[in-house]
Image (cartoon, grey):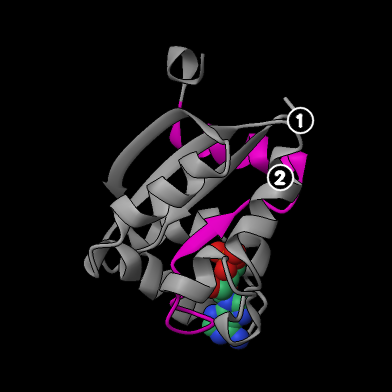
């Protein structure tokens, strides 16, 4: 499944009305939406999703933010999906994000940065499985 990645549109972008704009950029960049849902993460589920960052100083803030409102979760398909999607979203800190990237256009700060994108094929699989089951992924 190396042609797939996973994304979330984060609570800041959902609240600010950017779901449509972000999905438009994703589709225009050639990604196919395999599965998608708008949902909410409890603090417990957000903590589980970001467990790899548990020891980081921003973990508490990250969990609180990610459970503060609705998110949109999606599995995306394209050749070289993980790498190409990370290029499309831009640097984690929007201050460093290049022109034409989703974070340059929509992110507010390093924490409220509009979108998540998987950082490896392995994590794309794990993260997609966190939100979607069985037939939803086919
Ligand atoms: P994301 O790609 O979803 O993966 C981990 C997230 O942690 C990252 O995006 C940022 O939103 C968040 N993050 C990283 N560094 C910081 C920081 N210094 N302060 C707050 N949040 C951060």
What residue did someone put label 1 on? 2
Q: Are marks 2 and 1 in contact (CB under 8 Å)?
A: yes
Left or right placement of residue 50 versus residue 41 in this view: right
- Residue located beneath label 2 in the image: 82
In which image quadrant can residue 42 be found? bottom left
What kind of element bears circle 1?
loop
Query: 73 or 87: which is nearer to us?
Result: 87
The reply to whether residue 75 is in sight is yes
What residue appears at the point 75 percent right and 39 percent down from the top-left corner? Answer: 122
Q: Residue 106, relative to residue 110: is it above or below? A: above
Is 114 magenta? The answer is: yes
Relative placement, left or right, of 98 versus 37 is right
Please tell me which residue is depicted at 43% across the width and 77% down the height of the picture.
112
**Does the magenta portion include 112?**
yes
Residue drawn at (73%, 31%) of the image: 79
Is label 2 within 8 A of ligand 1 (CB to nearest ligand atom)? no
- Which segment did they paint magenta? 107-132
Which residue is at the front of the view, 92 or 90? 90
Residue sitting nearer the eye, 16 or 6: 16
Instruction: Name the spot of residue 2 as percent of width and height, x first.
Output: 76, 30
**Label 2 SS:** helix
Circle 2: is it few (<14), some (14-19), or many (20+) Cα within 10 Å? Answer: many
Taking the image as shown, residue 99 lies to the left or right of residue 39, namely right
Q: Could one spot residue 41 in this view of the protein? A: no
């Amino acid at each position: 499944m190396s042609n797939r990645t996973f994304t979330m549109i984060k609570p800041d972008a959902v609240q600010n009305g950017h779901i449509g704009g972000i999905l438009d950029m994703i589709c225009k960049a050639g990604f196919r939406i395999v599965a998608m849902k708008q949902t909410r993460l409890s603090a417990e589920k957000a903590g589980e999703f970001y467990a790899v960052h548990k020891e980081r100083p921003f973990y508490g803030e990250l969990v609180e933010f990610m459970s503060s409102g609705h998110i949109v979760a999606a599995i995306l398909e394209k050749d070289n999906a993980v790498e190409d999607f990370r290029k499309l979203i831009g640097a984690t800190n929007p201050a460093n994000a290049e022109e034409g990237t989703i974070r340059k256009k929509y992110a507010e700060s390093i924490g409220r940065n509009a979108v998540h994108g998987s950082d490896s094929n392995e994590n794309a699989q794990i993260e997609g499985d966190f939100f979607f089951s069985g037939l939803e992924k086919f």
